[in-house]
């Protein structure tokens, strides 16, 4: 557990801010210079005012003071611009770096991680939370430097005029500062709650919108709207508490500064009357106090920025600290020939495989089977029997326990994940398409000219012909909405294209054959399984989940799953001969009782 | 739409809180007066006591100043609270208005409109409005009022000096305007870059598994980097103008002080001129600061308003969408519970004008009858289901439920009469129970009965927390088959008279399907049922089969009759019925 004050801000600073120290040193220099000049102005003003009281004989002195003030003002324009640029530019660069690193982490994190986070939540970390981190690196550092510089220069100058008055002014301002600090802690909690509730509201609304046809078909618009209103009510309650606290806390600096000025007028006025101070010096003193109020007010903004950034960085660091499920990295001793190129399809050997999703009931129980290189296994079973889970484990979207899955005699979890994923082609049940052209969705980086056979094999040609721009049609949110079947065929084409030569691949198909008609299915399955006499390529190793027995009968072996267990395992003919689920289903599909 | 009319349309949401906004507006002159008075009070202490060495009344005068400061604090506090609470209440109401309106829009709207955009209306757009209400609108009024009060006080103290200083105003305003314009176009650039970056991030996060399965990490990171860099560069450019504007205003206010002192020096030589006193200079330094502070924040506040106006336009665009399923008002006669007769006469429907998907469907389903509808992709099966589920409106011809026209029925009666199960199961991120009741109060026995009937009880038993098991985002912890069973249970929970079932194609395996079918049939024995059937068992066991072809009823009869007929049905049968079935979800 990180300890101490603002552990996440410190960690962020070490990693991102400190390496850019040159910018910040230059910026700090400019800030100090700005403040020094800004404090010189009241001093010149004091000279000018006292000379003014002396009368016409001092006219030249007054004019000179005016000139000095003017020159300081002009110089401040240049130096203050520089100071802001030298703090804000590195902050933007840091934001860029942080975003980049976070996105890279997102790409590295595996499905177990994504199962425990809502996408909306992750997105808000990548957007809003990063903004707060940047506000710390830019706004907060600039204002922090500015406040410190202003305090030192202005207080120094005030003390030079009168230590007694300086101490007097410090009392109300100090009290105000302490009260604000108290309030800020509460502000932080409220702000965090608001952030969270905004996210929850958005998630709930998104769910209702995505399920709108169900909501309407069941006439439950009312209950759904009530549920959303309750959530919005919590958000409102929180925001109101926040607004009230803000109304009290932030103006306290102004009011404490105002009280300080009032006290100074009384006490300082008496000092002038007693001859301890000139009237010009008192006037200068007053404007220095006024000058101090602005940075102190900003300090009111600054604390929440620190606190928001700390909370945001805690959320961002949680992503960076999330374990990346790549056990092979912890076991370099086991890392075998994984990175060396292979030129044969993998042979799978599964021994006593048990798997449960994190925090879930067992999904796969004691599975044992073998698929030789270039062989095929069909998987059959009811919904929820673990078919999809098995494919997800074989693709290593989830890691099986060590030693339970062997690939060519090596433990699957010891293989380099990237290398394994390049060998595996997994087409899941629900297809994900990006808002790009169909060609881009299929290619995902492959050369365009290699797509044709896959498009043909996935029976996508007819679909493409009906689309406005054929394979160059943009799909998704910013384009054409494809039907479920079309989406699946695009995903199938993508899978087939990436299986490429097939020479070293493991193909995992999760119920995708239902997207094509029987005729296409038969051609496809024959080609994939190497049953095609004219095939000149070695077939890939295939594991195919399907309800179509017309496809299963071509597989070397079939594994029947029920409740995560293997209830039958053998060739199609063997299973057909045994009374049971497989046989029953065969008859159901053939239409014979 | 003109901006003022946009804001006036917000009135219904503002109205209940008008006293709060009235308090805020009423406190504006008071805040301005108290603020503008402070330098005058300070000047009085300086010029009437300190400079002229009059100790008498010095402290009283100083205390009056302190009282003005404390008064400002109290009034400004009341102003902020009234305004913020009013703003929060307003956007709460607006949110509710948007949500209730949106949920009532027809499917056609949602087919056109990306969900993310609709979501933004009730989240980011509403939040932008909240900012504008609490920190934009009346706050600008306060700024203007403050500046007016300050100018008034300055004229009153020294009109000639004030005029001289105001001579600086036109170039200053021109300069600020130049910067504002430059920054506005840069801001648009920044905003577009950010939108592109966020959209990319959102989509890649949602499709992360696909990226990982196809080893797209490096390629994706590269594309992300270029978007990220565009965003950074646009911001760095914007920073320069932002920083310069800020510093310019700061520096110029100092130059004003210089000018004032110089003015004092010039007047020293003039015999009859009222001198520039210490108090006057101190007061004017304070006033100049009070004049410049709103100027400095003005562009920010205007941005709030501009953003809010853009958001309001989008919000009202949504609220103006008038594509509802108009609910009827007629209730089914009470006590006809055992009934459920469905009669379609010459039903025609088109998604787009002149392109009929259903071309005159006439069929009657008698109470308790199970009718299977079969047909190829595009034959109009799914459209028929959608019409009956009242997802789509605007059919021609007549659909009668127990003798009452469907479009005339009240929502309550439709719900009592028809339960539908769609192919695509929509699950909500909430508990299993919520996904069945959909937030309605459902009798516990009724719920249990539906669970047992559909074997959804088996699914509940599979999860450790039973019915209270949370369903993860997009039903991540529910398999497709489980989802189908839940969807059926969901329909049965409401005990409808007529059940419209669009049978699952690929998701549910034959045995689960059979289990399901057993349960359904127990209910269907008492109910009218129209099934878009894909499974042979369902089709064969139906009382009657209707074959749709190109939006028309091509054949009708039992399995044996239709096979004997040797027509469209026989061809479908030979193909196994589920040919290219995936496309029917369109």
Image (spheres, coloured by chain):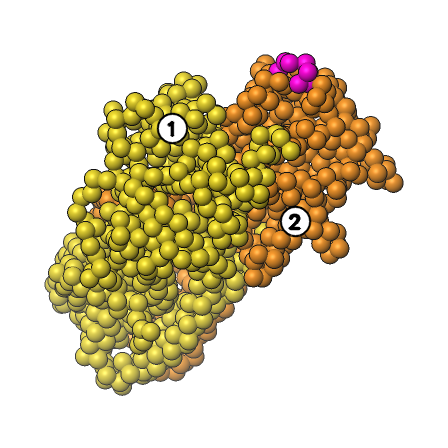
Question: For this rendering, which residue is in front, A552 or B196?
Answer: A552
- Would you say the residues marked 1 and 2 are in contact, meaning their CB atoms lie under 8 Å apart? no
Q: Secondary structure at mark 1?
A: helix
Which numbered tag is attached to residue A526?
1
Q: Report the number of discs.
A: 2
Q: Which residues are magenta?
A: B562-568
Q: The chain coloured yellow carries which letter?
A: A
Where B512 falls versus B578 (above or below)? below
The chain whose colour is orange is B
Residue A172 lies, with reference to residue B533, above or below; the image says: below
* Circle on res. A67: none
The residue sitting at 48% across, 37% down in the picture is A573
Q: Which residue is denoted by mark 2 in the rendering?
A: B455
> As drawn, is A246 to the left or to the right of A211?
left
Give whichever of B512, A289 is nearer the camera. Answer: B512
Q: Which element type, helix, strand or loop, lies under badge 2?
A: loop
């Amino acid at each position: 557990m990180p300890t101490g004050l603002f552990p996440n801000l410190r960690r962020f600073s070490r990693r991102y801010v400190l390496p850019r120290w040159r910018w910040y040193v230059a910026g700090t220099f400019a800030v100090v210079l700005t403040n020094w000049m800004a404090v010189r102005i009241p001093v010149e003003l004091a000279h000018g005012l006292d000379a003014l009281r002396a009368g016409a004989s001092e006219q030249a002195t007054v004019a000179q003071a005016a000139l000095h003030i003017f020159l300081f003002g002009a110089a401040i324009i240049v130096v203050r611009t520089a100071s802001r640029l030298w703090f804000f530019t590195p902050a933007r660069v840091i934001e860029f770096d942080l975003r980049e690193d976070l996105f890279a982490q997102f790409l590295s994190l595996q499905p177990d991680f994504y199962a425990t986070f809502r996408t909306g939540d992750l997105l808000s970390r990548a957007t809003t939370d990063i903004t707060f981190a940047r506000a710390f690196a830019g706004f907060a550092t600039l204002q922090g430097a500015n406040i410190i510089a202003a305090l030192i220069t202005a207080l120094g100058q005030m003390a030079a005029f009168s230590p007694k008055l300086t101490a007097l002014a410090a009392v109300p301002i100090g009290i105000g500062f302490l009260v604000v600090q108290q309030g800020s802690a509460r502000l932080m909690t409220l702000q965090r709650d608001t952030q969270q509730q905004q996210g929850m509201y958005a998630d709930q609304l998104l769910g209702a919108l995505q399920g709108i046809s169900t909501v309407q078909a069941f006439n439950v618009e009312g209950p759904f709207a009530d549920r959303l209103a309750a959530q919005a009510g919590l958000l409102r309650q929180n925001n109101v508490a926040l607004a009230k606290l803000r109304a009290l806390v932030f103006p306290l600096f102004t009011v404490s500064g105002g009280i300080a000025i009032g006290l100074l007028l009384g006490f300082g006025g008496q000092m002038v009357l007693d001859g301890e101070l000139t009237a010009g010096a008192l006037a200068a003193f007053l404007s220095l106090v006024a000058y101090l109020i602005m940075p102190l007010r900003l300090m009111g903004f600054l604390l929440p920025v620190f606190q928001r950034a700390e909370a945001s960085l805690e959320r961002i660091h949680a992503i960076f600290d999330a374990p990346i499920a790549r056990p092979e990295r912890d076991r370099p001793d086991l890392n075998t020939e994984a990175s060396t190129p292979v030129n044969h399809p993998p042979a799978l050997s599964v021994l006593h495989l048990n798997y449960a999703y994190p925090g879930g009931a067992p999904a796969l129980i004691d599975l044992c089977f073998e698929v030789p290189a270039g062989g095929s296994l069909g998987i059959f079973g009811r919904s929820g029997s673990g078919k999809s889970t098995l494919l997800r484990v074989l693709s290593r979207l989830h890691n099986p326990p060590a030693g339970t899955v062997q690939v060519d005699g090596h433990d699957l979890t010891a293989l380099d994940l990237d290398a394994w994923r390049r060998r595996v082609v997994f087409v899941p049940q629900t297809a994900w398409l990006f808002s790009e052209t169909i060609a881009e969705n299929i290619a995902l980086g492959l050369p365009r000219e290699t797509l044709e056979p896959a498009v043909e094999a996935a029976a996508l040609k007819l679909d493409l012909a009906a689309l406005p721009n054929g394979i160059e049609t943009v799909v998704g949110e910013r384009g054409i909405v494809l039907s479920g079947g079309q989406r699946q065929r695009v995903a199938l084409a993508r899978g087939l294209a990436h299986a490429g030569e097939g020479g070293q691949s493991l193909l995992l198909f999760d119920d995708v054959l239902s997207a094509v008609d029987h005729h296409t299915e038969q051609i496809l399955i024959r080609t994939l399984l190497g049953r095609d006499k004219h095939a000149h390529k070695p077939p890939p190793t295939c594991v195919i989940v399907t309800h179509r027995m017309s496809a299963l009968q071509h597989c070397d072996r079939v594994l029947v799953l029920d409740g995560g267990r293997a209830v039958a395992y053998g060739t199609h003919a063997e299973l057909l001969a045994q009374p049971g689920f497989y046989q029953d289903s065969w008859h159901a599909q053939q239409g014979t009782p | 739409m003109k901006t003022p009319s946009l804001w006036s349309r917000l009135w219904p949401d503002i109205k209940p809180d008008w006293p709060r906004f009235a308090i805020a507006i009423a406190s504006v002159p008071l805040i301005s007066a108290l603020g503008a008075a402070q330098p005058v009070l300070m000047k009085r202490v300086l010029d009437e006591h300190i400079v002229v060495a009059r100790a008498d009344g010095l402290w009283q005068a100083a205390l009056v100043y302190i009282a003005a400061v404390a008064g400002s604090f109290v009034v400004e506090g009341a102003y902020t609270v009234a305004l913020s609470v009013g703003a929060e209440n307003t956007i709460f109401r607006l949110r509710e208005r948007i949500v209730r309106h949106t949920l009532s829009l027809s499917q056609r709207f949602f087919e056109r409109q990306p969900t993310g955009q609709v979501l933004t209306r009730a989240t980011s757009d509403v939040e932008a409005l909240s900012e504008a209400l609490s920190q934009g609108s009346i706050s600008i009024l306060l700024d203007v009022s403050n500046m007016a009060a300050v100018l008034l006080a300055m004229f009153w103290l020294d009109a000639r000096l004030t005029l001289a200083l105001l001579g600086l105003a036109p170039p200053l305003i021109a300069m600020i305007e130049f910067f504002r314009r430059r920054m506005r176009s840069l801001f648009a650039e920044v905003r577009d870059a950010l939108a592109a970056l966020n959209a990319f991030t959102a989509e890649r996060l949602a499709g992360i598994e696909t990226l990982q399965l196809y080893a797209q990490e490096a390629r994706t990171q590269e594309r992300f980097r270029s978007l990220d860099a565009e965003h950074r560069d646009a911001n760095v450019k914007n920073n320069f103008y932002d920083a310069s504007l800020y510093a310019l205003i700061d520096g110029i206010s100092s130059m004003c002080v210089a000018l004032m002192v110089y003015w004092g020096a010039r007047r020293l030589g003039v015999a009859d001129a009222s001198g520039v006193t210490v108090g006057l200079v101190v007061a004017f330094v304070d006033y100049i600061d009070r004049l410049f502070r709103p100027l400095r924040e003005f562009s920010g506040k205007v941005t709030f308003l501009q953003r809010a106006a853009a958001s309001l336009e989008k919000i009202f665009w949504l609220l103006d969408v008038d594509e509802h399923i108009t609910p009827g008002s007629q209730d089914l006669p009470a006590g006809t519970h055992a009934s459920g007769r469905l009669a379609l006469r010459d039903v025609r429907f088109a998604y787009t004008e002149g392109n009929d998907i259903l071309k005159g469907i006439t069929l009657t389903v008698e109470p308790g009858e199970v009718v299977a509808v079969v047909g190829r992709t595009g034959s109009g099966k799914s459209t028929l289901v959608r019409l009956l589920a009242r997802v789509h409106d605007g059919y021609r011809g007549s659909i009668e439920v127990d003798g009452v026209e469907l479009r005339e029925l009240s929502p309550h009666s439709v719900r009592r009469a028809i339960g539908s199960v769609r192919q695509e199961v929509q699950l909500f991120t909430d508990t299993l129970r919520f996904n069945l009741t959909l937030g309605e109060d459902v009798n516990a026995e009724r719920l249990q009965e539906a669970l047992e009937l559909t074997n959804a009880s088996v699914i509940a038993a599979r999860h450790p927390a039973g019915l209270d098991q949370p369903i993860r985002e997009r039903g991540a912890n529910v398999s497709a088959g489980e989802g189908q069973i839940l969807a059926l249970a969901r329909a049965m929970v409401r005990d409808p008279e007529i059940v419209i079932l669009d049978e699952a194609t690929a998701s549910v395996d034959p045995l689960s399907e059979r289990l399901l079918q057993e349960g359904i049939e127990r209910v269907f024995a008492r109910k009218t049922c129209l099934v878009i059937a894909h499974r042979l068992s369902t089709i064969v066991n139906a009382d009657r089969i209707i074959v749709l072809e190109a939006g028309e009823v091509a054949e009708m009869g039992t399995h044996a009759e239709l096979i004997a007929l040797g027509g469209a049905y026989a061809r479908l049968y030979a193909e196994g019925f589920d040919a290219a079935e995936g496309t029917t979800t369109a």
